[in-house]
Image: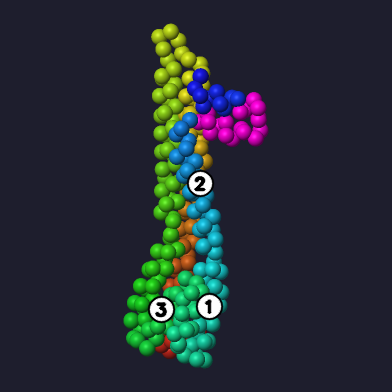
Amino acid sequence: MPLATAQAKVLCLNHPEGDSVFSIILAAGWPIWPLLFASIVAVALIIERVGALRRHRVLPPGLLQRVIGEYRQQGVNESTITVLEAQSPLGRVLAAGLRNVGSTREVMREAIEETGSVVAHELERYLTTLGTIASISPLMGLFGTVVGMIEIFGSQAPTGSNPVQLAHGISVALYNTGFGLLIAIPSMIFWRHFRALVNSFVIDMQQQAVRLVEVLHGERKA
């Protein structure tokens, strides 16, 4: 009997409820450990992005109107721009426009676009890693399935099959397949949600930046 299977059975007998998850991990064999690591990373990234991509944190309500009002009252000064940059991603984009308020409309838009590209890249932080986990988790589960199938075929002998090794191979194959899908499905859902959220933020920042340029150049009212 494989050591991992024997340990799992002992744990199940002694602690049928508390150690059930640990016994499943042991029954799944060594291919489950990369999947466990991927699941921990995915959960950490999802929690981090949920906090970082809150709308009021990225696009504070009323920020554009406040910036325009302060500009009309006291003009542009470095301290105001520095505070604005530190407030939010939208504040960084608007601050880029204020720094070039004395330049032409084209120069202001170029400065805003450059800053906007950097801000958009920062909003997409860790999304590539989360998407990669969503893509490779089923493959990692498939790899565990292959390992389990190898153990199943290895249990076959001319004198008959080894029931314990056969059962362990089936456990490895099924547990890894299921766990790979369990990681991939929510990771893919959150990845698509975060991508759509970032795209909406970028479009909203672009619209507000264009309004700022047009208002500061007298082409429209606030």
What residue does disc 3 label?
96
Label 3 and label 1: CA atoms lie apart by 14 Å
Element on which disc 1 rests:
helix
Q: Residue 91: x percent and y percent?
A: 48, 75
Residue 13 is a magenta residue: yes
Principal SS element in the magenta part?
Answer: helix
What residue does disc 1 label?
63
Q: Residue 211: x percent and y percent?
A: 45, 80
Q: Residue 216: x percent and y percent?
A: 43, 87
Label 3 and label 2: CA atoms lie apart by 38 Å
The magenta segment is 11-28
Marker disc for residue 40: 2
Residue 65 drawn above or below residue 115: below
Which comes sooner in the sequence, label 3 or label 1?
1
In the image, what residue type sits under mark 1? Leu
- Residue 197: tell me if it is visible: yes
